Image (cartoon, rainbow, N blue to C red):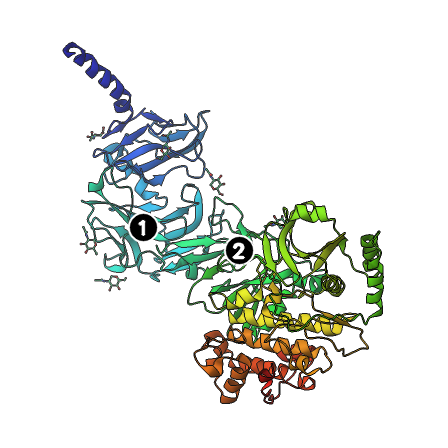
């Protein structure tokens, strides 16, 4: 064992040999010396070993001739020669025999050079690399040609500049510049990337005529001085000494100038460069707000927005519906990930678009339209119907329309107002309402749960309905005949086989909801690119179910409106009766309204508009007037964009257009049912108006129509309480001090008045849905409503 020791030592020495030859701590680098780019191994270190000059491999196979901190694991680069054109492996830097420092690629092509008539070179302990000529004259030094970093003892003279690198790991010239101009002003600019010219000044010391030098001294102060050495501006300070800390100040790729310190004692253990926080964490304070340039994207790229993180660093992000142009470069900007609005049929495509709200967000300088004073609804509508409009900004009655590309995007509490991002439905990566909990699980088509007050005696008073029933009696070919029949009515409904629907729903596995006569299941239509559907399966066929089925096919099959759930097809095979609907991803209004968190006032208003428009369509715009008879939150579903869609026509009654009233047994759900149902009065469309009035109150107050557990007895019945609050001028109590609603007190009051008109006991006093729609939208004045009377007591 003992005799083996010398060999072991020899072997170890042998192992160390290649390192010591490559990494010598040269004090003087003599003419003819050279370094070859290979695996991080070749450099000339300063006498202390703290700095090194040589090749660093960056990215995939590119080599950077650089200077770096050599005693810390990060090997943080503070200077580089060829960021714009990386060298390949086996590139060579040589101090030539004739006294020039030259970087050549493996083929001998010159990439970069410095100095001439050099006697020797040296990597100095300050981090400066110098080329020295005769009589110790410094011919060239890296401190004189900084890239993006300055170090203690380094100075920036008039005309000197730092150019940010392109990204954290790409060292080519980037988008920002920090320069002490020849006029004495110290300025930060955006650059006209990829050109060298400057674009927008986002910070300056305003020292034209007096600024002379930026000095980074050994106590960690960075100051701008005048020619007479007096201090004009304290740029930054670490308040730590260079004895105990490595220090550097860098214009980073995000455009922010930051000073960093690194405890020398940490040696190879710690691995961070904490920021120095004096006098401010960084320059400029909030770059997101500082850059507002006429050309160029702003602090982040086009169509993106900038937001200051908790660490005070700017983050570039894409709005919903937009993706980064280049995933690896968050400053590259964002592109729309949906098909833009078709200008030829903009008016017809409006129902394909919706808005995502972003509070405190703006893209200054991208506007092409400005309107004031207007309401938010007006602003939304104006942008929705304009195919050029990508985003609308609404703030204090002002409305700006923004076009693509959006620039200077930012989010900041000081911005105020909100941005309305226009998105195409069903074609964006992120769904709206990300904040809503368990979105997937709320995906339901809740069916009735209705408490039927009377039996459904369906009267076939329409001739064509009688025809349908007649056809239905034929057992053979009946489906085909129904289909043919529906086609003749212009209904583009698909007839499904039972097997198809069994497959689509995976054997009726996932139940979405259950009603008196039917259960609804979630399904997927494989042949239609996995389109999601809701399949309503009727229970064993009893006579009433048959009626409900037929009513529903007929009623909804004929309709086509953006506020109605679209019937896609049906199955009528033997005993099986099924209906296939579009799937509504955001569940029922009941869940939305009475869930855990109070939905936003504006969304609630939009839903009220949607329901009103849908009912108006059913009552007055269909060829056959349809009375829904069961309007309530469970039967209003919400689509991708949280638009209201009326569903469940199981109880609907059809009226010929010249026939305005009908008499029938009670349908509908307790609490939403109009008083005339109990008085054997003729049933008209006004029963839906009544139910809508109740629903509108629920939307306004975010509470259920009947709350038997209410602390205060006077609040138990919403309709009564609402009227009391209205009379007593206590609307803020009614909405539970909902700030959003109170801010719009005029509108709130108007909506309550409309609701009170709708729930008048006398049907003839109730407005039509057309009038309701007009009143909601502000096209018609709302007069003071009378007391709706004690209608509830008659239930
Ligand atoms: C470096 O070389 C120069 C010129 O040959 C010489 O004067 C100087 O003393 C040398 N310095 C060191 C530290 O060797
Ligand atoms: C060279 O160093 C860089 C950074 O210091 C590191 O990312 C890279 O993996 C190293 N390459 C090799 C071949 O060791
Ligand atoms: C760095 O970014 C520039 C500008 O986009 C690009 O041209 C260059 O190829 C990038 N370099 C590397 C090594 O990725
Ligand atoms: C130094 O120069 C600055 C600016 O030119 C001037 O304001 C200041 O008074 C001068 N200070 C002295 C001591 O001369
Ligand atoms: C660095 O500058 C600061 C601020 O002017 C000064 O207080 C400090 O003494 C200076 N330190 C050195 C080593 O010059
Ligand atoms: C998110 C998403 O699916 N976007 C798609 C919208 O439609 C266009 C054109 O069909 C596609 O290119 C997008 O990828």
Please state which of residues 255 and 463 is positioned toward the viewer in this rendering.
463
Task: Report the residue marked by disc 1.
Answer: 157
Task: Report the residue marked by disc 2.
Answer: 441
**x, y percentage for residue 196?**
46, 48
**Mark 1 neighbour class, 10 Å CA radius: few under 14, some 14 to 19, many 20 or more:** some
Residue at the image position 60 percent from the left and 49 percent from the top: 509
Please state which of residues 198 and 387 is positioned toward the viewer in this rendering.
387
**x, y percentage for residue 299?**
45, 55
Which quadrant of the structure image shows residue 401? Answer: bottom right
Residue at the image position 43 percent from the left and 63 percent from the top: 412
- What's the mark number on residue 743? none
**Badge 2 or badge 1: first in the primary sequence:** 1
Please state which of residues 466 and 143 is positioned toward the viewer in this rendering.
466
**x, y percentage for residue 39?**
37, 27
744 relative to 291, above or below: below
684 relative to 91, above or below: below
Q: Residue furthest left?
A: 2
Please state which of residues 449 and 688 is positioned toward the viewer in this rendering.
449
Could you say whether the residue bearing mark 1 is in a helix, strand or loop? Answer: strand
Evaluate whether residue 374 shows in this view: no
Query: What quarter of the picture does the C terminus occupy?
Result: bottom right
Evaluate whether residue 755 shows in this view: yes
In which quadrant of this rendering is ligand 1 seen? Answer: top left
**x, y percentage for residue 526?**
67, 45
Position of 484 compared to 191: left or right?
A: right
């Amino acid at each position: 064992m003992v005799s083996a020791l010398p060999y072991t030592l020899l072997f170890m020495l042998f192992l160390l040999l290649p390192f010591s030859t490559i990494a010598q701590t040269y004090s003087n680098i003599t003419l003819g010396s050279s370094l070859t780019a290979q695996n991080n191994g070749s450099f000339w270190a300063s006498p202390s070993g703290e700095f090194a000059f040589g090749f660093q491999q960056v990215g995939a196979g590119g080599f950077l001739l650089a200077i770096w901190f050599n005693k810390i694991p990060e090997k943080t680069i503070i200077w580089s020669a060829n960021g714009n054109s990386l060298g390949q492996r086996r590139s060579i830097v040589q101090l030539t025999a004739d006294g020039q420092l030259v970087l050549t690629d493996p083929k001998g092509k010159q990439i970069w050079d410095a100095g001439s008539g050099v006697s020797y070179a040296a990597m100095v302990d300050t981090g400066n690399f110098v080329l020295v000529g005769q009589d110790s004259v410094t011919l060239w030094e890296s401190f004189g040609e900084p890239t993006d970093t300055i170090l203690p003892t380094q100075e920036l003279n008039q005309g000197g500049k730092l150019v940010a690198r392109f990204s954290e790991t790409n060292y080519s010239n980037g988008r920002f510049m920090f320069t002490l101009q020849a006029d004495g002003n110290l300025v930060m600019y955006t650059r006209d990337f990829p050109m060298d010219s400057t674009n927008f000044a986002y910070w300056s010391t305003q020292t034209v005529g007096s600024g002379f030098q930026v000095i980074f001294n050994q106590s960690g102060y960075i100051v701008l001085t005048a020619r007479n050495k007096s201090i004009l501006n304290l740029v930054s300070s670490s308040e730590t000494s260079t004895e105990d800390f490595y220090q550097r100040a860098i214009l980073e790729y995000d455009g922010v100038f930051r000073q960093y310190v690194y405890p020398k004692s940490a040696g190879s253990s710690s691995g961070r460069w904490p920021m120095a926080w004096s006098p401010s964490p960084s320059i400029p304070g909030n770059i997101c707000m500082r850059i507002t340039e006429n050309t160029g994207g702003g602090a982040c790229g086009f169509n993106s927005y900038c937001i200051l993180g908790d660490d005070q660093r700017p983050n570039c992000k894409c709005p919903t519906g937009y993706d980064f142009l280049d995933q690896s470069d968050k400053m590259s900007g964002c592109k729309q990930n949906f098909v833009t609005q078709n200008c030829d049929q903009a008016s017809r495509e409006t129902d394909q678009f919706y808005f995502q709200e972003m509070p405190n967000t703006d893209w200054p300088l991208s506007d092409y339209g400005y309107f004031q004073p207007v309401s938010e609804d007006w602003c939304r509508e104006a942008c929705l119907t304009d195919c050029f409009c990508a985003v609308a900004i609404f703030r204090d009655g002002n409305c700006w329309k923004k076009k693509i590309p959006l620039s200077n995007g930012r989010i900041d509490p000081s911005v105020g107002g909100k941005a309305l991002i226009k998105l195409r439905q069903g074609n964006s990566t992120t769904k709206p309402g990300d904040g809503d909990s368990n979105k997937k699980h709320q995906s339901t088509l809740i069916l009735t749960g209705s408490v039927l007050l009377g039996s459904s005696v369906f009267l076939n008073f329409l001739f064509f309905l009688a025809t349908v029933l007649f056809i239905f009696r034929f057992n053979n070919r009946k489906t085909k005949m129904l289909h043919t029949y529906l086609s003749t009515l212009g209904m583009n409904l698909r007839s499904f086989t039972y097997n198809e629907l069994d497959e689509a729903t995976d054997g009726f596995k996932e139940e979405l909801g259950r009603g008196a006569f039917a259960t609804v299941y979630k399904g997927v239509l494989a042949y239609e690119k996995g389109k999601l559907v809701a399949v309503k399966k009727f229970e064993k066929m009893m006579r009433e179910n048959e009626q409900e089925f037929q009513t529903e096919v007929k009623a909804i099959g004929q309709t086509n409106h953006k506020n109605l759930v679209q019937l896609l097809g049906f199955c009528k095979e033997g005993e099986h009766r099924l209906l296939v609907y579009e799937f509504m991803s955001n569940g029922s209004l009941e869940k939305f309204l009475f869930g855990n968190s109070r939905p936003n006032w504006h969304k609630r208003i939009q839903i009220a508009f949607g329901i009103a428009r849908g009912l108006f369509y059913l009552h007055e715009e269909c060829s056959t007037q349809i009375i829904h008879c069961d309007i309530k939150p469970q039967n209003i579903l919400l689509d991708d964009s949280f638009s209201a869609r009326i569903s469940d026509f199981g109880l609907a009654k059809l009226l010929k257009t010249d026939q305005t009233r009908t008499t029938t047994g009670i349908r509908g759900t307790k609490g939403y049912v109009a008083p005339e149902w109990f008085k054997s009065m003729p049933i008209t469309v006004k029963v839906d108006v009544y139910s809508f009035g109740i629903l509108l109150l629920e939307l306004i107050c975010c509470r259920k129509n009947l709350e038997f557990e209410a602390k205060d007895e006077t609040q138990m019945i919403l309709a009564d309480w609402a009227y009391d609050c209205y009379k007593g001028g206590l609307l803020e109590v009614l909405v539970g001090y909902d700030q959003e609603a109170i801010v719009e007190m005029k509108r709130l009051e108007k909506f309550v008045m409309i609701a009170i008109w709708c729930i008048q006991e006398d049907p003839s006093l109730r407005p039509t849905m057309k009038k309701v729609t007009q009143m909601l939208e502000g096209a018609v004045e709302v007069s003071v409503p009378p007391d709706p009377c004690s209608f509830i007591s008659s239930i």
